[in-house]
Amino acid sequence: MLADIMTKALRDGGGRAQVTDRHTRLTHRELDRAADEQATQLRALLGPGERHRVAIQSGNSVAYLVAYLAVLKAGSVPFLIDRASGPREVQLIWQDCGLDLLLQDEAAAAPEVGTPRGTLGSLLATGLPAREDAPALHDLTQVCRFTSGSTGRPNCIEFAGAAVHRAAANWAEGTGLSGGDSILCFASLSNGLAFNTSLLSAFLVGADLHLGSGLPTGGAVSRLLASTAATRLVGFPALYESLVRRPADGTAPPNLRMAVSSAAPLRPDTRSEFTARTGVPLQNYFGVAEAGPLTFAADPLTDPGLGQPLPGVRLRAGTAAAPEVVQVHSQSMGTRYLNAPGVLEGRIDQDGFYHTGDTGYLSDGSLVLTGRTSQKINVGGRKIDALEVTHALLDVPGITDAVVLETPDRHGGSALAAVITAEPGFDPAEGRRRLSERIAAYKVPSLIRVVPQIPRGSTGKPAMAQLRGLFDTTGQPQ
């Protein structure tokens, strides 16, 4: 179903609309042909059978798009893994989900259990051993994506093809995306910010899609905005912070009409400075991995929060005087966690509303967030589970106690920090190296304090105010 929808959209886009990266430019019709060719190669790599589980772990590129569509055309299920995930995390996903094949760009490291199987386009193909105990996919599942799990293992969200389609179609309708648009996307395609706003949605309306990759410096983004004639810019807050830190030169992107951010809060001064320089409102929409894109502000300059519900979305929240856990109902809802039976279903009430863990209220129909109840921390647009990092720290030899928390970095954004106690003679640098072997690099705390004892209240809970105070000093992290 999803392959058919994408194929029709690409053929309707024909030879006018295009997808590009730094090295490649294909029309929508050429992208469709390339995917057909790779689907044939993929069937040969996989052998007999249906609904093979094919993971894609790559930076943004046209090659990623071709491979993704080829997996769907081959009748297999794509598992979209964050490019920053390390070999150990990929191996955990294989253990939990039973992957058959892993497609990676050259910079990614395959897990030890893999066997090289050649290439698919420019991506390296690694075969993975069959797992007899792999959980069965839901009958409707056509795409799987990941979010941090409370157990320290990534939760694999199963999506029906209809949910993926509605996420893209409702985003296009709710934001006025059209064939005249040109999207410049720096968010990773495995992340909902890009997946929902810039992938299928661009194809459905026949818009151009330009993919940025790597660390987005202000100069590089500005040059791409000009060269692609982008009308929409999609990226995490760090991208916009990089742009406003660059000295203003008095010029503004001539075609840009919309800038979209999500996954982490935007600093008010970043938003106002970006708008002052470009004349373009910076939209910070609300979305949840399990439920897709949820809100969008029609007029972000006057909207009191994160916007009104997109088509197909209903919200429940509290009042300004009494914020409550935000509950959402959408047409783009995930079905379940493949590797955590019952967990996602347990967060959905009898009316079909998902309990997000964020707290907030509705103001004239716009969602205003006031906090969160979960242990997930947003750093640079990535949601990191504090419990997962804590467990990894306690596995490092010499560390005896640990608390992971969020603190401001030197630019006023969010940083991942840890306070630990350790045995005599513990070397923090060696501990950091050991930690990086256990979790992805972006999950390693950038700030670490070693203390004789972690302050705790009478209930045994960490005294978070005291812990955050440790990072208010001028001392350097250990």
Image: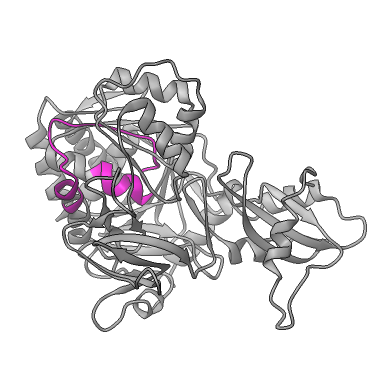
- Residue at the extreme right of the image, as rendered: 424
Looking at the image, residue 395 sits to the left or right of residue 30; the answer is right
Q: In which quarter of the image is the N terminus?
A: bottom left
- The relative height of residue 282 versus residue 395 in the rendered view (above or below) is above
Check if residue 179 falls in the magenta segment. Answer: yes
**Closer-to-camera residue (82/358):** 358
- Residue 194: image quadrant is top left
Q: Identify whether 50 is placed above or below 201.
A: below
Residue 25: image location, x then y, percent: 26, 23
| Residue 452 shows in this picture | yes
Toward the front, the furthest residue is: 321
Q: Which residue is nearer to you in this view: 110 or 118?
A: 110
Residue located 92% across and 60% down the image: 424
Left or right of residue 434, residue 411 in this image: left
Residue at x 31%, y 18% (from the top left corner): 226
Q: Residue at x 21, y 50 (%)?
A: 171
- Counting from the top left corner in percent of width and height, residue 93 is at 48, 60
Q: Can residue 118 be seen in this view?
A: no
Q: Quadrant of residue 260?
A: top left
Which colouring convention does the figure follow?
A: one colour
Residue range (magenta):
170-199
Q: Give 338 or 186, whichever is nearer the viewer.
A: 186
Judging depth in this view, the residue of 129 and 89 nearest the camera is 89
Q: Position of residue 88 (x, y in %)?
A: 58, 55
Residue 61: x %, y % from top left: 36, 33
Q: Which residue is drawn at 30% across and 32% down?
A: 280
User: Total marks drawn?
Assistant: 0
Q: In which quarter of the image is residue 454?
A: bottom right
Q: In this view, does 57 lie to the left or right of 451?
A: left
List the single residue furthest toward the left: 12
122 inside magenta stretch: no
